[in-house]
Image: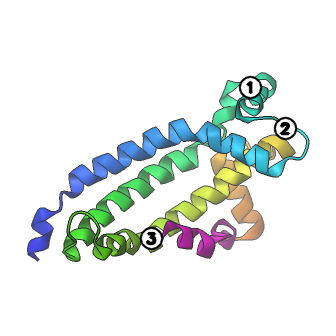
């Protein structure tokens, strides 16, 4: 197991955690705007800035971040898993720098674990983003999760799991 000596999981974990936090805080408002554009026929007309400014004006600035807790947590975990698993499998497969099919295999090897985390996050995030439009059933992400699991069973949070895991590949 000499390949383990070359893996710096601590550095990879810190990099993944940082990427998860920064990427989520920056990207979440854009994801909210995208969801509004994809799901609304009347309120989401116009461009990105028009929709974002309407959200801020009508619902307040914090509405841009409603439901951010699950993706903030899960994407931090997900990026940590992705960074560390890629580094581990890259060494395990003895992948060379640059183009090497073993780099692709290393990236794909962590997908089943990543999909298990990201499916739940995507489901709750989408429910919370739509909740701002459809009636505000949920007080927060945890309330959303527990309400939906109580109503539909635990399998509800894995809706779209196969598609999501395939995307993680």
Mark 2 and mark 3 lie on one chain; the one further toward the N terminus is 2
Instruction: Write down the residue under mark 3.
Output: 111
Residue 45 numbered mark, or none: 2
Task: Judge depth for marks 1 and 2 and give the one in front.
Answer: 2
Mark 1 and mark 2 lie on one chain; the one further toward the N terminus is 2
By secondary structure, the bulk of the magenta-drawn segment is best described as helix
Residue 162 sits inside the magenta stretch: yes
Occupied quadrant, residue 155: bottom right
Could you classify mark 2 by the number of other residues whose Cα lies within 10 Å: few (under 14), some (14-19), or many (20 or more)?
few
Out of 145 and 30, give the one closest to the viewer: 30
Distance of label 1 from label 3 (alpha carbons) = 36 Å
Residue at 68% across, 42% down: 32
Residue 143, image x, y percentages: 68, 49
Contact check, label 1 and label 2, Cβ < 8 Å:
no
Residue 106 sits inside the magenta stretch: no
Contact check, label 1 and label 3, Cβ < 8 Å:
no
Distance of label 2 from label 3 (alpha carbons) = 36 Å
């Amino acid at each position: 197991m000499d390949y383990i000596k070359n893996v710096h999981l601590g550095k990879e974990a810190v990099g993944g955690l940082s990427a998860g936090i920064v990427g989520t805080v920056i990207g979440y408002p854009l994801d909210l705007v995208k969801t509004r554009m994809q799901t609304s026929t009347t309120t989401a007309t116009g461009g990105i800035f028009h929709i974002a400014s309407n959200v801020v004006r009508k619902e307040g600035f914090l509405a841009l971040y409603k439901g951010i807790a699950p993706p903030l947590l899960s994407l931090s975990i997900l990026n940590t898993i992705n960074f560390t698993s890629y580094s581990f499998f890259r060494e395990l497969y003895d992948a060379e720098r640059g183009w090497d099919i073993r780099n692709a295999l290393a990236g794909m090897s962590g997908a089943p674990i990543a999909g298990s985390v990201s499916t739940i996050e995507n489901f709750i995030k989408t429910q919370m983003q739509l909740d701002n439009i459809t009636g505000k059933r949920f007080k927060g992400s945890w309330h959303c999760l527990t309400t939906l699991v109580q109503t539909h069973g635990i399998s509800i949070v894995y809706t779209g799991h196969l598609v999501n895991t395939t995307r993680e590949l």
